[in-house]
Amino acid sequence: MSAEPRDDLPLSGIRVLDLSRVLAGPWCTQTLADLGAEVWKIEAPGNGDDTRGWSPPDVDGESTYFMCANRSKASIAVNLKHPEGQRIVRQLARDADVLVENYRLGALDAFGLSYDDLSALNPGLIYCSISGYGRTGPRAAEAGYDFVIQAESGLMSITGEPGGAPMKLGVAITDLVTGMNGVQAILAALLARARTGRGQHIDLALLDGAVSVLANVGAGYLAAGQAPQRLGNAHPTVVPYQIFATRDGSFALAVGNDAQFARLCGLVGHPEWRDDPAYATSRARVLNRERLIPALEHIFAGEDTAHWLATVRAAGIPAGAVRSVNEALDAPEISARGLVADTPDARHGTLRLLRSPLRLAGTPPREPAAPPRLGEHTTQVLSRVLALDEAALERLRAQGAIA
């Protein structure tokens, strides 16, 4: 990819200094890159971002985990333990609009790269810190990992089969949510800066983000004192809303309101349920799920999945096949939306990558550029942004400050 900026994208002209690794921070900065920001990903010479070594799966030895969160960025290999490497990052921060980091508490302070250090050089800098437990509080110094955060936040306690073990989601959801929160906070800070001329520090915690997505389940405890239980694929307040087995497989059924349930009653041969006080309202169905669900399970088991999907969808009731990841990514509706891109790549020819899911009619996100190799843009960015000539770059290489 080229690290050259563009002027036709929503965040054109915004420069992001990315000191983050693994997932939450890179997910945030990838979205900023999708929207047109110029993202300088600072990586340690040698190994770079931890996820470069996370495989399989991989493409000829290159980690697909790294690929998922680093499209359309420029990689600069800088040794932050070297004084000259620290000086380079300070110079880049002087010219940046946004900095995103997920170092342990105090680590960047030791390098002279704290918010106080850099905001003194660049008062307009928006400095986003991402950590497990926030930059304040009794656990601020602890490292945070998605798996542990899912456990501690309560998310695991509501995920899994009734009576079974607590389960994590199949992806690192607290990292992803925190990355999305980072994008929202940074965009808000950019708007605020447009009014005030000043940047600010953003303090995001994985635990905060995870607790916030407890949503209705959390509100049920806070406002009504109701301790939620695991329901497997069922919904705590909407019935029927779960997976049902069929004669040859299964399907997901989401009956979201009383009108949809009334239509379902006719489809399953029980029109009398429409007026039955035990089933006629959403609240009644929740209270009587132990009677209703077994009856529906018996009915659905009598026909094939294709029959029920066609029948239920024709009645305007949401339903879907239970797909594998392969089936989902190859589905015709995903193709029609253009979510998968065949991306040119210097080493592999092309890579199949996801496009941004954000749809802006007037200023659409950029087409994905291949995730960078470690240090691929060191020379390009430092010569353009910091006006370093080849002699200066060679001296820095010889000192071990860059690679």
Image (cartoon, grey):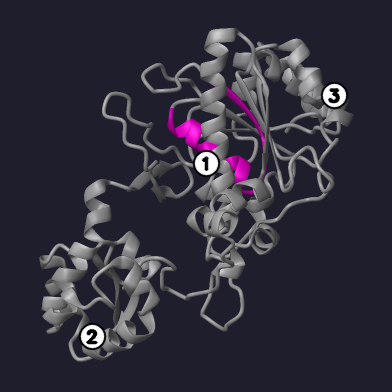
Rendered image quadrant of residue 146: bottom right
Res 257 label:
none
Magenta stretch: give its range. Answer: 15-35
Alpha carbon separation for disc pair 1 and 3: 28 Å
Rendered image quadrant of residue 355: top left
Q: Earlier in the sequence, mark 3 or mark 2?
A: 3
Where residue 233 sits in the image (x, y, percent)? 42, 73
Classify 85 as above or below 327. above
Question: Which class describes the residues within 10 Å of circle 2: few (<14), some (14-19), or many (20+)?
Answer: many
Q: Nearer the viewer, residue 309 or 332?
A: 309
Residue at image position (41%, 73%) is 234
Residue at image position (45%, 19%) is 12
Where residue 178 sits in the image (x, y, percent)? 59, 44
Q: Which residue is mark 2?
A: 300
Q: Amino acid at mark 3?
A: Gly
Q: Secondary structure at mark 1?
A: helix
Residue at image position (76%, 23%) is 115
Q: Which residue is mark 1?
A: 180
Q: Would you say the residues marked 1 and 3 are in contact, meaning their CB atoms lie under 8 Å apart?
A: no
Alpha carbon separation for disc pair 1 and 2: 38 Å
Q: Would you say the residues marked 3 and 2 are in contact, meaning their CB atoms lie under 8 Å apart?
A: no
Whether residue 12 can be seen here: yes
Q: Nearer the viewer, residue 394 or 345?
A: 345
Classify 124 as above or below 188. above
- Residue 32 in magenta? yes
- Quick check: 199 left or right of 141? left
- Quick check: 382 left or right of 212? right
